[in-house]
Amino acid sequence: MYYFPASQKSRRFRLTEESGDRDINDPDDYLRDAEMKFPPAQGVNLLRQKIALPDDLKGKLIILFIAFQQWHQSLVDSWVPLARELEESLPGVQFYELPVIQKMNFLAQTFINEGMRAGIPNHATRQKTITLYLDKGTFRRALDIPGEDTIYVLVLDSNGNVIWRTEGAYSPAKGDALHRLLVEHLLQTIGEGLSA
């Protein structure tokens, strides 16, 4: 069973009866029985490698930081220390940054990519930064993202299913909820392997 954090802006999911009077903005409150797959997309990382999402993403559990505006980088950066820690301490967890930009011609894409590449000298960060040039409206609708005023953090399983989501800058409550979800999911996977 997969869990989604509740969001007032979410239109696709419904709260379960057991949610009672809980605060729907609390990262520990979840929506159940919802299915969402990450839409197929083509991207290019800052090492100039073509990446097919979600198929080419490595990891059993994949954390995605989706940003729409250049100023969103500071919001993504607020999550990166935790993401690195989770990646190092939990086997099978990987994270990626996804700048999402409206589809444009090849020269404009190259100019933007090379500008980002020049600003990010770290090889690992370049590998994990995958720029998507696509129809942003279609992409946002597929993931039930209502706007572009903040970042969205998604967790995918190895089949590309969205199993958790939140939005905005890191907070200890959001970080704890993410950590618990990852640990619970990994333990569930181990338990299923042992009983098989």
Image (cartoon, grey):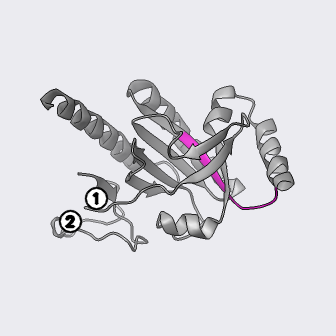
Find out whether the residues at labels 2 and 1 contact each other: C-beta distance under 8 Å. Answer: yes
Residue at 69% across, 55% down: 71
Assign a secondary structure to mark 1.
loop
Report how many numbered discs are placed on residues in the image: 2
Q: Is residue 52 above or below residue 102?
A: above
Q: Quadrant of residue 62?
A: top left
Few, some or many residues within 10 Å of mark 1 (<14, 14–19, 20+): some
Assign a secondary structure to mark 2.
helix
Q: Quadrant of residue 30?
A: bottom left
Q: CA distance from mark 2 to mark 1?
A: 7 Å
Instruction: Choose between 81 and 44: the one closer to the eye.
Output: 44
Residue under label 2, please give it.
Answer: 19
Could one spot residue 145 in this view of the protein?
no
Residue 68 part of the magenta segment: no
Few, some or many residues within 10 Å of mark 2 (<14, 14–19, 20+): few
Q: Amino acid at mark 1?
A: Asp
Q: Amino acid at mark 2?
A: Ser
Q: Residue 168, how many percent across, how many down?
A: 52, 56
Q: Quadrant of residue 36?
A: bottom left
Identify the residue at the far bottom of this view: 11
Identify the residue at the far left of this view: 195
Residue under label 1, please give it.
Answer: 29
Quarter of the image that includes the C terminus: top left
Could one spot residue 118 in this view of the protein?
yes
Mark 2 and mark 1 lie on one chain; the one further toward the N terminus is 2
User: Which residues fall within the magenta stretch?
Assistant: 96-105
